[in-house]
Structure formats: structure tokens, C-alpha cells
Amino acid sequence: MKKLLLLAIILFLGAQHKVFAQDGLSYYVDGENLRRSGQHEKAVMEFTRALQKEPNNYKYLYAKAQSEFQLKRTDAALSTLNNAIKAKDDFAPAYTMMAQIYKSKGDFDRASSYYDQAFKYEDDATRKVSYKLFVMNKYLKDANFEEALVKVKEAKEVAPNNEIVMYHYAKISNKLSRYDDAANAVIAVEEKIKAAKPEISAKYYFELGYAYFHMDQYDKAKLAWEKANYGPFRARLERFSAKYASNVGLAYFKFYENDLAKNYAERAIKIEKDFPSAHVLMVQISKRTSDQSAAISSLENAVASSADPLKKLPLYIQIAELNLAADRLDQAIATSDKALAIKSDDAKSNLNKAIALYRKGMFKETIELVQKALLIRYDGATVAEFNFLLGMAAKKTANTELAKQAFMVSLRSSLKDATEVELKNLKDFKLLEEEELQPNDNTPEPNKDGKGGK
């Protein structure tokens, strides 16, 4: 009987040895203990042994890749993770770690691709959202707002009440002129953010006001912006004031862009019904577009009766301006030439002639005249005016770099507000309302336990 019991024990131990010899669990357990204690070189050796027993075990492969990554063997880690994905193609942590590795290499395109894959198989909603926000930010950095909207919508489907997701949805919708969607997104989470500190809630109310403003709902915009009037948003809000619109209109008026001037004056009045300078500008535009022939004739008679060239100069300037107002551009050029024959460096006459050339569509000639005039030592305000016109003409010839350089000069003048509008249209000027977007922010690290997914 004792012999039979001894035989049974020997057979049992042999069977157990055979089981452990066939799988790599014991090596994997040893490797995990080493990995968790930071002994990654030894851990890799144990995981390698485990994989010799079970070459297609995705958990062993994932664990080995983690230690390889810690040892900065990124290519080896990527190869190991590829094998893990081949073994189990819905294993979310492997995709996440692939994304993290490519992110560490600065390859945000591939990182985004793997976060998109991880999103498909991840069970945890918080992680799913973070993956999509990373991808969204990547597209924002590329200024691909349409694709960024697609990505944030996917996050919104997972977490429709997540205020961070809804903020990004509102911001991107505003960029794409989907103002109704933007407003509704903020309203949907307003209960969550209205009691928050201003440093948190201000950006939501800024987007809400921005949406209302562009839907011409100025009263609603004003109410929203009262809650956004905090910190850096104060400067941004000035760009939506009646004063700002009126300043832009006045700048365009100086350069005889009457339609643009009128549009901005009307906007200022919509924002603030009784804003005085906007009403004054509307009157000036109306006077300018009235019949100027009698005034021109009277001034021409005054020139003819004067023998003193220096007395003729201001009269020629007035006649040129009236011709510009009447859109008699050839006459404006001819009269400016007469003034310049008296005083070749006269700032007003050079500017009037340049404006007339610009209004005729002679942009190359405008640029040449302005660049020649800028060789003369004029005061700062005059230099700014010439540069604003230079920027406008350069923009028309698609010379973006010259336009930008010129506008950066006029940016430091009373033409600042209109210059900002022009630079924004060139998409070369970073207004305060724009945020720096780093596509590698706020994304969770790889799941160190290899959990997640399906």
C-alpha cells in the first residue's frame, strides 16, 4: 500500500513539473516581480523565457514591451507590441503603449492612429475620452478643424455630459461657424460650470458669447461675456466691443474702403445702439458718397487764381481727396502728381496717389510707390499708414510675407484694431483668443497592469 502511495506522489509531482515546463507562467510571475521593482533587464530575460514556452501569449508580450520601453529600447518594444496585437487584436493597452512610444518620438500622426485604435477596444470611458482628445488636439495643431470636430464628436458620444468635451466641441464649432451647435454645447453643461471659479468657467462663457455674437444676438452675447470677463479673456472681449468695431471702420474709411467702413460702423451700432463715434462715421461715409463736383470745381478755381505754389499745395491735396471720395481715381492721381511736383516728399500727396493706385487695382504700382515713400523720414503715424496700405496691396498680390511684415508695423499705431483684423484674415497672426495646443498633454500613460480592452 505504501509503495502504491509513493508511486502516486511521484506521478503527481512529475505531472506538475510537466505542466510548468509546458507553460511560462512561473517565468512571467518572476518577470513581473522584477519589472515592478525596476529591474527591467532581468525582467526581460524572464519574459523571454516565458515566451519561449508560450510565444503567442499577449500578456507576456505586453509585459516584455513595458520593460523594453523602460530600457529605452523603443524599436524592440514596438516589435514586441506588434506581436501582442497579432496575438490579440482587441487588446487596448498594447495600442495605448504604441501611441505613447510614438508620442515620445514626436511622431504625433502615428500616436494619434494608435490612440484611435485603442479607443475602439477600451472599456473605460474616461480613457476613451482622453484618447480622442489627444487625436483632436493633433488635428487642431494642424489647423484641420473639420477632422478635429469629427474626433471630438466621437468623444461626445462616449461622454455627452463631460464638460471638457463639450467645451472643445463648442470651441471647434465656433471656428467652423457652427454657432448654434457651439451655444447648445455650453448650455448643455452650464449647470456644471456656472458655480465654478471664474478661472474655470470663463472660457465656457467666452465661447457661448462668441457664438451668440456671430449669430447677431448681441444682448445674449453681452450677458454671457459678463461671466467671461476674467483674466486673459478681458483683452479678448475688447475685440467684440462697439469701440473696436468703430475703430476698424474708421481705419478702413481712411483708405476709402467705404463698404468695409460702413459694415463695421453698422456692427458697432448693433452692439451698442447709441455708440457716438459709429454714428459720426456713418455721417462721414454718407457725406463722402454725395456729389463732390461743385466742391472740386470751386477748389480748382482757387488753384487757378493762385500764383504761389505753396498755397496751391493744400488745395491740390483737398482736390485729390474729393476725387478719391467720388471714385474719380485718374483725376486723383493727376492732382496728386501736381502736388508732388511742388513738394516731392509731401506725405499726404504720396499717400493719396498710392490709395488711388490701390483703388484702381494697380497693386504692384502701389507697392512700388509706398516702398519708395517709406525711404523718406516721416513721423510714426504716417509710416504706419503707408505700411497698412502696403499690407493691403501685398495681400492682393498674394505676397503674404510682405503683407505680414507691413502689418506688423501698423500694428503699433492707431490702426491696431484694423491691422489685427487683416492679420487674422491672413491666418498669420495669433490673437489672444487662440490657445497653444500641445497634442501630448493630458493623455493617460499605458495601463501598467495590462488591463483594459476586451
Image: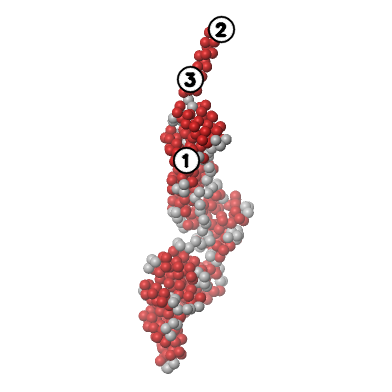
Q: Nearer the viewer, residue 286 or 154?
A: 154
Q: Label 1: few (<14), some or many (≥20) within 10 Å? A: few
Percent position (x, y) of residue 284?
49, 77
Crowding at mark 2 (Cα within 10 Å: few <14, some 14-19, many 20+)? few
Residue found farthest to the top: 1
- Secondary structure under badge 2? helix
Please name the residue shown 39% across and 68% down the image.
Answer: 396
CA distance separating discs 2 and 1: 56 Å
Q: Quadrant of the N terminus?
A: top right
> Which amino acid is tagged 1?
Arg
Image: 294 above or below 5 = below
* Residue that badge 3 annotates: 18
Residue in front for this viewpoint, 150 or 384: 384
Identify the mark nearer the N-term, 2 or 1.
2
Q: Quickly name the residue at label 2.
A: 2
Q: CA distance from mark 3 to mark 2?
A: 24 Å
Q: Which numbered circle lies on residue 73? A: 1
Amino acid beneath label 3: Lys
Which of discs 2 and 1 lies nearer the camera? The answer is 1
**Precedes in sequence: disc 3 or disc 1:** 3
